[in-house]
Image (cartoon, coloured by chain):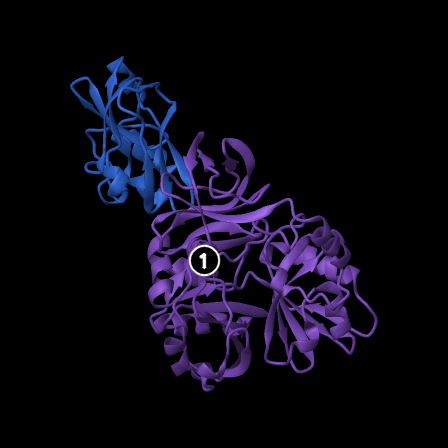
Amino acid sequence: MNIPTELRYAASHEWAKNENGTVRVGVSDHAQHEITDVVHVELPAVGKTVEQGQPCAVVESVKAAFDIYAPVSGTIIAVNEKLSGSPELVNQSPYKDGFFFVIKASDITQLNALMSADDYQKNLAH
Amino acid sequence: MNKQTVLYNEHQKLGAKFTAFGGWDMPVQYTSITEEHAAVRTHAGIFDTSHMGVILVKGPQSVAFLKLITPADIDRLVPGQAKYSFFLNENGGIVDDLIIYARSNDYLLVINAGNREKDMAWVMDHLIHDMAVEDLSDQICLLSIQGPAAQKLLQPLVYENLSAIKYFHYLPAMFEPLHLAMTIARTGYTGEDGFELFVPVAHAAAVWQLIAMTGARPCGLGCRDTLRLEACMPLHGHEISDTITPLEAKLERSICWQNDFIGKQALLKQKETGLSSFLTACTVSDGIPRAGYEIRINEVPAGLVTSGTFSPTKKTGIALGYINRPVAAADKVTIVIHNQPRLATIVPMPFYKRNK
């Protein structure tokens, strides 16, 4: 299971990447594997305010829909437009081309509440 | 604690993901629902359907009994033939749907896994003299090989000529690699050509392995559901249930009105008063409809989705559901997906029909 060390992780399997005060968000390799074939993604509108721990997007397999939770509070400043035509990018490239959106964090220290790669790995083992 | 089928170890060896279904731990997929779905539409897949129940009906009064507990035209059912039917309650609701296989001296009824105890109790409640029923579910393993290449792949393993088996017919056959007698029926639940095999449980794993070696792809319940939904085949607990009648489910073609079956009076009354619930198929391009989602006509709540998914063949959201009135051309139909009404297009059933 691929768990890049430079990212932070939520217990709900989103990853968050600090890019100088903005936060790029996607789902972990473990999550895309558990979701199975992603066939549809619903993203928030750019400009929408999101709150840490609240659902703000949906990822769907053939069988089920899964909520995506905002790892930090803030404003959506970009979404991955490619996912509407190519949702399979979430499976193929969960940490890069399959990212979901970028948040302008209202308080970047909220990232500290997320897990390190090490802790996330231990959490998965439970 | 869920039950495990006799093929559980085979599924584990193949790395299946499991799901609970009808009291059983069943493989939902081995690699990918969309890939397994495509394999059945374009080549062939093999399914473990051994969770299905099998009831034997025997004795001189078997015909009278089946004419009472099902609306099937039993008199015209000859040995070697199979018929889709249901058990109806007094209100005309569908207790379960089933396939009746007529044999020379008795009948086999194949019923849904999750309804096995309920069905057995219901059958026992209606027993008449000079006949008996027996639950053979633990002795027979049902396997299903489905897809346009099913006959080509299965034929080298079977002595009899499979092309002689017509749709909804079966043959007692010899499975040559094991010198094993089994029943092979041309039936299925995928909308493709294919066969269902009645295999003695002791040989199930060997038969499974030999068929998998022909190139038929192991397929889980995940694609079984998307395949049957594209073909608009009903699933008990969804399109049909104890409170839904065959008339509402558009299954009147399976009713023999000459017979005096349980539920007939309720159905006749419903025919007279007219339906108030209409099975409808629709597609949604913006989002994926799921069972339980609300259907609206011109912004007014009008019903619920009974089955919905992303159609791997059509690459769009598809749904079956019941609405409280027929839709007119000018009506705007929406399905509420993630708290937002999304435009739905009413389409004829089925979503998918194979080229014959």
Q: Quadrant of residue B154?
A: bottom left
**Chain ID of residue with mark 1:** B
Q: Could you say which is closer to the camera, residue B100 or residue B156?
A: B100
Image x and y of residue B95, in percent: 67, 55
Residue A55 at x, y percent in the picture: 38, 26
Residue furthest to the right: B129
For the point 69% across and 55% down, the residue is B118
Q: Is residue B32 visible?
A: no
> Dot 1 lies on which element?
helix
Choose between B228 and B49: the one closer to the eye.
B228
Q: Residue furthest left?
A: A20
Which quadrant of the rendered structure holds the C terminus of chain A?
top left
- Give the answer, above or below, for where A104 lies relative to A43: above
Amino acid type assigned to the residue bearing label 1 in the image: Arg
Instruction: For chain B, give the colour.
Output: purple
Q: Position of residue B218 (x, y in %)?
A: 39, 63
Chain identity for the colour blue used in the image:
A
In which quarter of the view is residue B116 placed?
bottom right
- On screen, residue B311 versus residue A83, left or right, reads right
Horizontal relation, residue B265 to residue B102: left or right:
right
Say whether residue B173 is left or right of residue B37.
right
Q: Report the label total.
A: 1
**Residue B28 versus residue A55: which sits nearer the camera?**
A55
Identify the residue shown where x is 32% and y is 37%: A41
Residue labelled with disc 1: B224
Label 1: few (<14), some or many (≥20) within 10 Å?
many
Does residue B355 appear in the picture of this structure?
Answer: yes
Residue B138 point in image, percent of width and height: 61, 66
Left or right for B231, reference A96: right
Q: Is residue A20 above or below residue B287?
A: above
